[in-house]
Structure formats: structure tokens, C-alpha cells
Image (cartoon, rainbow, N blue to C red):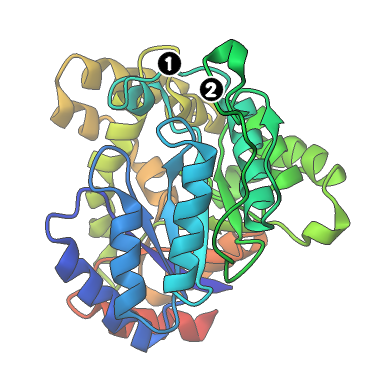
Amino acid sequence: MELATTLEYAENDPVQAVEEVVRLEKAGLDAVWVAEAYGFDSPTLMGYIAARTERVKVGSYIVNVFSRTPALIAQTAAGLDVLSQGRALLGLGASGPQVVEGWHGKPYDRPLGRTRETVELCRRIWRREVIEHHGIVDMPLPPEKGGTLGKPLKFLNHPVRSEIPIYLAALGPANVRMTAEIADGWLPHLFIPEKAGQVWGNALAEGLARRPAERGDLEIVAGALLAIGEDAADVRDLARPMIALYLGGMGARGKNFYNDLARAYGYEEAAEKVQDLYLSGRKKEAEAAVPDELTELLSLCGPEGYVRERIEAFRAAGVTQLNVRVISPEPARIVEKVKGWL
């Protein structure tokens, strides 16, 4: 199992955060994922990380498939891959209506079709095919849609890799099914290893049954807040604002994928209460309404033996890259310790 961390989109000083990544790389960190949402864009920070590091993989967490064209996504990933000398990971996803409509001003339509089409086009572009494609996106734009030149093109540069690994963020059954079929890796958010099978087991099995053999095994990147110590269980409360934000604020009633996930886990009443409080502006009350059991299952916080057991639960659930946010005055020491357990 590899060890990763995420550069949070709300990070106030990303330059200092990258300096921490440099230290964690020396301690054994394998990968860093750069979140975006409606904060700093991830590719800019990924390029800086690539320049400041030597070994860690650098991934986007996530680039949504609405705000950039498939061609631009492919160009950006290829540029990052050459700057990092083959260490780029392309994390893609449909995001949700809150970000796509609320921030980018794009209609949230055909998310699965857009994702599948983007994956296909990225791989064709990296192989330097002459691109003629007509679907949700037209390349080139035909005359009947306002196009004037209509000449198919191929990528000017020669990418370092003709297949940059693509990881998809997915929660719903149809999206998870597609991810298991076409992606190199899966980025499930708010992942509870003990409950993963009951929520996603069928969708994963159906997608894997259609997966081409040459695609290899599906990588799974998941993890949680990490703190080790006899009093580390208290650190779990630091996850409450994030959990409340996603259950309550990342979408409207009936259109919040993370709230749906909490319900699928068995927290129907709590999910409804957190959402009601959050959407009414009572954020602190929403945080307090997150069940203690949920904060525990969505964290890796406690004595050393307990944390090792939780890590084994992630491994048993198929996780191949443990993605953690380390809470410690000496995060490099914790990374070195945990890396030794993996």
C-alpha cells in the first residue's frame, strides 16, 4: 500500500504547504493530491510541487469535466507529466451542481457521459491521434454548429507517457460502475472501509466484469484524518467541519451526493439533520450533529495499535493508496512510522 496526502483547497499558504510536502517526501510519502473545488486551481500548484520534489506522484483531486474542455484537460495533464518526468496523475470527476453551476456557471448535465468522453479523448490525444469526435463535445466544431474551419488536429507535443493514469472521483452506483470499467484508479470521498462493500460492492463487481484485461487492476485511493497517540481520539473532532460541509453544503436537498452516501451508510436521520442545520446557516450546530461514530469511522485517530487496525481495515477493503491528513507537530515522523507499517 502506498502513502499519500492531500493539499487542501482551503490551504491559506500553499507555498508553505508544498514545503511540508518536500519534507514528507523525504520521510517516505509516495503521492500528493491537490484539491481544487472553488479555490486555487490544482494544475498551478501541481507544477510547483513537481518542481520542488523528485519522487512523489502528483495528482489532481479533482479536475471537473465541465469547466475545461477535454482537449485542455489532456494538454494540462501532459504538460504536468513532462514537468514531473512522468509523475503526474489525472484525477477527474463530475464534481456536483454546487461547484459546476454555482461557481463555473455551467449546467450540470450528462455528468457520466462527459466523464466517459473526457477519458476517451484524453487517451486518444496523448497517443497523438488526429482527433475527429462528435458527441457531447465536437472536435472539430462542425459548420452546422457554427464551425468555420473544421480541420481535425493532433497534439503538437510528444507526451512523456501515452497513457497518464486517470483516477475518477465517484460515489453513485452508475459512476462507480463506470470507474471500475474504464479508469486506472478510483477516488471515493468519505470512504468507510467497513461499509464500502454494502454500498459499492455490486457496482464495483459489475464494472470490473466489463474492464479490459490490459487496463490492469483498479487502484483505490482513500483515507482519513491521521493522528497517533493515547489522546489522539480527540483529534477526530477536527473532521466535523469537513463532514458537515459535505453532508450539508455541497448541494441542495435531493442533490447532494455526499448526503446520499451518509444515508447509504445508515445515517439517514443524522444526514437530514446536518443538512437542515447547515442550509439554514447554523454551521456550528450542523458540525455538532455529526454522529461521533461517523467521525470515528472517517478518521485514523487513536493509539498506535488502534490506528494499525484501522489501516488494515482500509487494506482489506481494497485500498491501494492510503491518503491521509496528518495532525502532528512532527508530521514527517508520523509519515515515516506509518510508511513502515505499509
Q: Residues within 10 Å of mark 1 (few under 14, many from 20)?
A: few
Q: Let me know if residue 270 appears in the view.
A: yes
Q: The disc labelled 2 sits on which kind of residue?
A: Thr
Q: Is residue 73 above or below residue 257?
A: below
> Between disc 2 and disc 1, whose residue precedes?
1
Q: Is residue 181 above or below residue 286?
A: below
Callout count:
2
On the image, the x and y values in percent for residue 87 come to 50, 72
Q: Is residue 84 above or below residue 295?
A: below
Residue name at image x 81 percent, y 37 percent: 206
Closer to us: 109 or 72: 72
- Res 282 → quadrant: top left
Tell me the residue that label 1 is attached to. 107
On the image, the x and y values in percent for residue 182 come to 72, 45
Q: The disc labelled 1 sits on which kind of residue?
A: Pro
Closer to us: 80 or 204: 80
> Which mark identifies residue 76?
none
Marks 2 and 1 sit apart, C-alpha to C-alpha, by 26 Å
Q: Residues within 10 Å of mark 2 (few under 14, many from 20)?
A: few
Tell me the residue that label 2 is attached to. 148
Closer to us: 217 or 139: 139
Callout 2 secondary element: loop
Residue 214 located left or right of residue 76:
right
Q: Quadrant of the C terminus?
A: bottom right
- Res 279 → quadrant: top left
Residue name at image x 43 percent, y 26 percent: 259
Q: Let me know if residue 227 appears in the view.
A: no
Q: Quadrant of the N terminus?
A: bottom right
Closer to us: 120 or 172: 120
Residue name at image x 48 percent, y 36 percent: 69
